Amino acid sequence: MPRTGRPRQFNRDQALDTAMELFWRGGYETTSLDQLKAAMGSLSSASFYAAFGSKEALFREALARYLATHGQAVAPLYDEALAPREALEQTLRASARLQTDASRPTGCMVVLSATNGSPASAPLQALVAAERGRNREAIAACVRRAVTSGELHTDTDAEGLAALAEALLVGMSVQARDGVPQAAVDAAVSSLLQLWDLNRVAASNAQP
């Protein structure tokens, strides 16, 4: 009688990391169940469903793994012990390094894995959109904190500056997939920070 249980050497954490990279590289809908099972150690269907429940449940778990590891590039945005400019720079520089690193899938899993899809994957599209929304609000809060603390001039277009920073963060994914090198993405970060500093200089000059 054929064996239907998990392979003897099945390593769930390793399999989850493999699935995370497949979803990150190819997206939820493009990555087939057969691809997942094969890459995770030639799992049988019985083993796959016993370990992860469903493809959608696996994606949710893989996304959580991404957020807890590579996704920590945005953690400085949520650290109010950092000055706002430093928090934003740390986030953007770390994201540029992560997203252009050729040793792993390029771009950001939150941006690329389920942005578009069929109605069947709408819950997962909403899941990653909500995560992008949290980062968007964190950037906006960072800029507002800079205005409130006096780091930026009160006339600063906080909404516009935050939208520009978020557009850069999200746009890195497409640039990275297109092969734009880290140095070029870093140059864009530097240009954004120069705009930040122009507003900060204005604040300094406005003092009596």
Image (cartoon, rainbow, N blue to C red):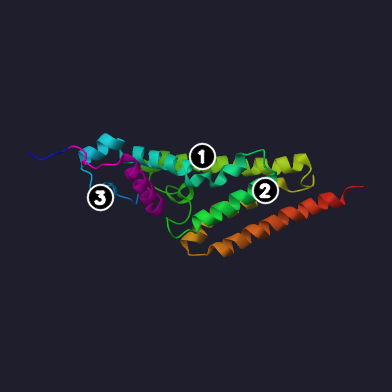
Name the mark nearer the viewer: 3 or 1: 3
178 left or right of 190 in image: left
Q: Which span of residues is magenta-colored?
A: 5-28
Mark toward the start of the polypeptide (2 vs 3): 3
Q: Residue at left 57%, top 64%?
A: 183
Q: Main secondary structure of the magenta part?
A: helix
Q: Nearer the viewer, residue 17 or 113?
A: 17
Three-letter amino acid code at disc 1? Answer: Ala
Residue 161: image location, x then y, percent: 68, 50
Is residue 95 on the magenta stretch? Answer: no
Residue 168: image location, x then y, percent: 59, 54
Residue linked to disc 1? 130
- Under circle 1, the secondary element is helix
Residue linked to disc 3? 38
Residue 106: image location, x then y, percent: 45, 57
Mark seen at residue 86:
2
Q: Is residue 163 visible?
A: no
Q: Give the CA distance from mark 3 to mark 1.
A: 31 Å
